[in-house]
Amino acid sequence: MTDPVPPYSGIEGLWNADPIELATMLFRQVFAPRYAEVLPRRGVGSLEEDLAALAGIQLPSMRMYGTPPGSTLLQLGLECVLIWERAGIAARESHGTNLNVEHQVIMLRMGTTVLQSADPEATVRRLLGR
């Protein structure tokens, strides 16, 4: 059995994708498995791994902050989070003290609408237009 073909072809495929399409794909990748949780959330740093999966790339186990490909994936991930926030489907949240701060993205009520939609991308575009 072969692995499924990823929706994007490498980093270039992610970078050249329509931002709203990419944000919708990443939203579904991140939150569909967490839909039934009391508080669906994902660490901001984990978005790099989620995007890498969408692009079919393997990230090295040891990465340095600010170096490729993680730096590009972080940029794209944060761009997606901004789109989610504008659409009202997810928001950033940080908690902790001093050097022990955790940054997460939490799915909001309208995120359920996207996950249940027959056309999630159209739903995100509609929410952005309200």
Image (cartoon, rainbow, N blue to C red):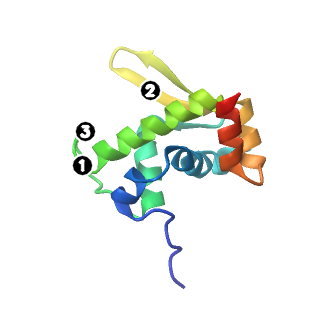
Q: Amino acid at mark 1?
A: Pro
- Position of residue 79 relative to residue 62, above or below, is above
Give the quarter of the figure containing the C terminus: top right
Work out how far the residue at label 2 is from the one at label 1, CA to CA, in angstroms: 23 Å
Camera-nearest label, 1 or 3: 1
Q: What residue is drawn where x is 72% and y is 47%?
A: 115
Mark sitting on residue 102 = 2
Work out how far the residue at label 1 is from the one at label 3, CA to CA, in angstroms: 9 Å
Q: What residue is drawn where x is 40% and y is 53%?
A: 16
Can see residue 17?
yes
Report crowding for label 3: few under 14, some 14 to 19, many 20 or more residues within 10 A (C-alpha).
few
Q: Amino acid at mark 2?
A: Glu
- Position of residue 33 relative to residue 2, above or below, is above
Picture coordinates of residue 43, whole percent (x, y): 48, 36
In the depicted view, which residue is nearer to us: 56 or 35?
A: 56
Can see residue 38?
no
Q: Secondary structure at mark 2?
A: strand
Picture coordinates of residue 113, whole percent (x, y): 76, 40
In the depicted view, which residue is nearer to us: 37 or 106?
A: 106
Q: Are marks 1 and 3 in contact (CB under 8 Å)?
A: no
Rendering quarter of residue 79: top left
Q: Secondary structure at mark 3?
A: loop
In the depicted view, which residue is nearer to us: 108 or 104?
A: 108
Report crowding for label 1: few under 14, some 14 to 19, many 20 or more residues within 10 A (C-alpha).
few
Q: What residue is drawn where x is 34% and y is 58%?
A: 12
Residue designated by label 1? 68
Picture coordinates of residue 80, whole percent (x, y): 50, 39
Mark sitting on residue 65 = 3
